[in-house]
Image: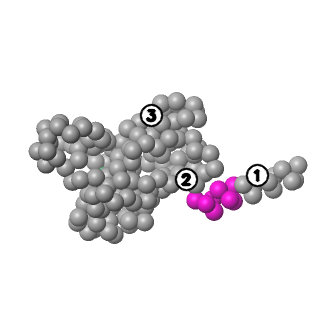
């Protein structure tokens, strides 16, 4: 009995030392942010989170070395004006997914320490209730990026590339 407890503690310690959970229960797809050349500015990070454990999960915190503060935000329309609000968690339904996207939920990087340049990538750590800590890499896209894949008729990108 005692041996078993020690073994479990050992595995947990290794997981924490590596900085991520041994078993990912949430799939993170397509994390991206818009380029931001301003220092001390902020940037929103978008991605799709899918619960593969079948029990649901909650994103409860995030952090990145490129920002002094990282918050979880939602957008709400108040008297016809879109406003961002910090929330304590973003929940992922059991077996389902949520898409963090412009105008909806997102991870907010506040107080950027470096400019976010198109084509580069930044590390992001996500903390989930069940999956614990998951490391991911956020791709930086052009300033004009609005959606993860629609770009019809965008004059800056030469029109109809897809
Ligand atoms: Cu925000």
Residue at 41% in and 36% down: 98
| First-in-chain label (1 vs 3) | 1
Residue under numbered circle 1: 8
Disc 2, SS: strand
Residue linked to disc 2: 133
Instruction: Write down the region rendered in magenta.
Output: 12-19
Q: Residue at the far left: name it.
A: 155
Callout 1 touching callout 2 (CB < 8 Å): no
- Residue tagged 3: 97
Q: Nearer the viewer, residue 128 or 11?
A: 11
Q: Measuring 48% from the left and 36% from the top, which residue is drawn there? A: 50
Res 43 visible = no
Secondary structure at badge 3 equals strand
Q: Looking at this view, is 104 or 52 the one in front?
A: 52
Query: How far is disc 2 from disc 3 in space, using C-alphas?
Result: 18 Å
> Of helix, strand and loop, which mostly describes the magenta segment?
helix
Where residue 70 sits: x, y (%)? 39, 58
Across and down, in percent, residue 160 comes to: 17, 37
Q: What kind of colouring is applied to the model shown?
A: one colour
Q: Is residue 17 magenta?
A: yes
Q: Which mark is residue 49?
A: none
Horizontal arrangement in the rendering, residue 9 relative to residue 43 (left or right): right
Question: Could you classify mark 1 by the number of other residues whose Cα lies within 10 Å: few (under 14), some (14-19), or many (20 or more)?
Answer: few
Mark before the other along the chain sequence, 1 or 2 = 1
On the image, the x and y values in percent for residue 156 come to: 13, 48
Cβ–Cβ under 8 Å for marks 1 and 3: no
Q: Quadrant of residue 6?
A: bottom right
Question: In this image, 90 relative to 132: left or right?
Answer: left
Residue name at image x 69 percent, y 59 percent: 13
Q: Residues within 10 Å of mark 3 (few under 14, many from 20)?
A: some
């Amino acid at each position: 009995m005692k041996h078993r407890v020690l073994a479990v503690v050992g595995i947990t310690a290794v997981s924490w030392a590596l900085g991520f959970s041994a078993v990912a229960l949430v799939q993170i797809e397509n994390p991206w942010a818009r380029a931001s050349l301003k220092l001390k500015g902020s940037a929103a990070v978008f991605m799709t989170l899918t619960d593969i454990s079948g029990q649901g999960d909650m994103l409860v915190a995030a952090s990145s070395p490129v920002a002094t503060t990282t918050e979880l935000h939602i957008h709400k329309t108040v008297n016809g004006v879109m406003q961002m609000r910090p929330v304590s968690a973003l929940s992922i339904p059991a077996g389902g997914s949520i898409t963090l996207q412009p105008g909806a939920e997102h991870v907010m990087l506040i107080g950027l320490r470096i400019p976010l340049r198109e084509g580069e990538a930044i590390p992001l750590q996500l903390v989930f209730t069940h999956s614990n800590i998951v490391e991911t890499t956020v791709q930086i896209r052009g300033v004009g990026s609005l959606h993860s894949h629609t770009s019809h008729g965008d004059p800056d990108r030469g029109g109809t590339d897809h």
